[in-house]
Amino acid sequence: MSHERENWGSRFGFIMAAAGSAVGLGNIWRFPYLTGTSGGGAFILVYVLFALFVGLSVMLAEFTLGRYTAKAATGAYKQVSRQWTFVGFMGVLTALFIMGFYPVVGGWATAYIFKGFTGLLQHPEAVEDVFGAFISDPVQPLIWMVIYLALNIAIVIKGISGGIEKAGKVLMPTLFLLLVIIAIRGLTLPGASAGVSFLFKPDFSKLDGSVALAALGQAFFSLSLGMGCMITYGSFLAKTEDLKGNALIVTIMDTCIALLAGLAMFPAAFAYGVDPAAGPGLIFVVMPTVFANMGGLGQVFHVLFFIAFTVAALTSSISLMEVVVDYFIEQHHKTRKQAVLYTSIIMVIMCVLASLSLGVMADFHILGVGVFDFLDILTDKVYMAIGGMLLCLCVGWSVKKEDIYNEVTNNGELKFGLFGLWYGLIRFVNPILIAIVSVSGLIANENRALMIAGLASIGVMAIFSKKMS
Ligand code: TRP
């Protein structure tokens, strides 16, 4: 069966969509709170190193595999060899599991747009309690999660260049601008310098295997790697495009936006006495506090910020949903509408459980953690890192070097002086490094049972790889 692949409307459109996939809750919500709970500067340093060396090379490998096979993730792996099919399938599972909690946080962001109108900013001292009460409520966050999911469905149902590309083009630049303004505001507050040293003065005594794995997982999460998303995006890329240039731009944009979000968050957090280790609520506490103290303009900024934040999340979650939808379309020959329907039903069920696990279902544990944490840890600390490692092994060892060279240089038309270095990273350095970080993370982590179960599940998938569709 031959597939007619749509192509991206323009190069700018592709970069915006790929960057839109990369820049999301990972940069603006997750990166700052992990930085806060993992000790600041040392975490940032390790994170940036992982993003620039491991992340960039893996992204290029994903683009290359996608365009080489002209297939979405599962099909791409299957085309290389049936023994690799499970990695594509694992990617689909990863996307599905991430979408089991991502829309919950996306829903919080959406809700916070409207909280700008309902008195949140009049009581800066209560901002933290309002957040705690909101996310543990059995009804409110569910409604917002469903609204957020509905937005995803509306975009994904229209297909690739119709929806995703247009959304990315307008709203990414808006987000960037807002973050710059907020960072400048934060940096000019009295007491902000403590936040700057927290960010940029590394305290290496805080580094251990667990922090390293958190940084590696975060790099994969933030760059949308390790589960086939960028393979799928690459498969839509025209044969004339410069893959390495695109990978470089997306990686740099994503890393800069994460750092910018950190700069917007921590100086203000220190200035207003918010605990930097506050956890997942950090952004929902710090930002409204900043805005509440801004006077009249604060409300405008609050609403604008949470709109941009929600849209950044949207351009990411549609890319996750697209991976699952493409799987149903390509591997099970469903129509786009059917595929979207099945995907949505599974996601709603998981998201309801994940959301309730922060409130009324807090005592329900799987392998020692609640549903939200279960999905988060399993994807971020196990599936994505191992997925990235397997991708490297697949591209580095199972595809002919000549084919990879031709694909990445557009049949020799583009110069790639660092090809040898990149290929060495893919074949040797990345797999070994990921293995070391994963093992030391496993040893240092308190959620060992869950992580071992995750690894075992990958082993089972590998065994049944050839039987998978
Ligand atoms: N990168 C996105 C973020 O930072 C999340 C995301 C989108 C993602 N697509 C992905 C993560 C694919 C892993 C894999 O919010």
Image (tube, rainbow, N blue to C red):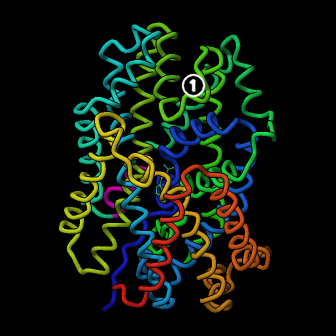
Query: Could you tell me which residue is drawn at 51 percent across and 58 percent down?
Result: 449
Figure quadrant of residue 153: bottom left
Residue pictured at 74% horizontal, 21% vertical: 194
Please name the predominant secondary structure of the magenta segment in the image.
Answer: helix
Residue 168 highlighted magenta (yes or no): yes
Residue 136 in the image: above or below residue 340: above
Residue 145, x across and y down, in percent = 28, 41
Where does the image place residue 112, in percent across and percent down from the top left? 36, 27
Q: Is residue 252 visible?
A: no
Magenta stretch in the rendered image? 160-170
Which amino acid, by three-letter code, is at mark 1? Answer: Ile
User: What SS does tag 1 mark?
Assistant: helix
Determine if residue 448 is in view.
yes
Left or right, 335 with respect to 214, comes to left
Magenta stretch encompasses residue 384: no
Give the x, y percent position of residue 304. 42, 27
Question: For the point 20% across and 73% down, which residue is it?
Answer: 335
Q: Quadrant of the C terminus?
A: bottom left
Point out residue 134 in the picture as x, y percentages from the top left corner: 33, 26
- Front residue of 93/459: it is 459
Q: Quadrant of the N terminus?
A: bottom left
Q: Is mark 1 within 8 Å of ligand 1?
A: no
Reading the image, the residue beneath label 1 is 182
Front-lying residue, 257 or 32: 32
| Relative vertical location of residue 419 with respect to residue 262 in this rendering, above or below | below
**111 versus 239 height, above or below:** above
Q: How many marks?
A: 1
Q: Residues within 10 Å of mark 1 (few under 14, many from 20)?
A: many
Residue 250 figure quarter: bottom right
Q: Residue at x 58, y 19 (%)?
A: 274
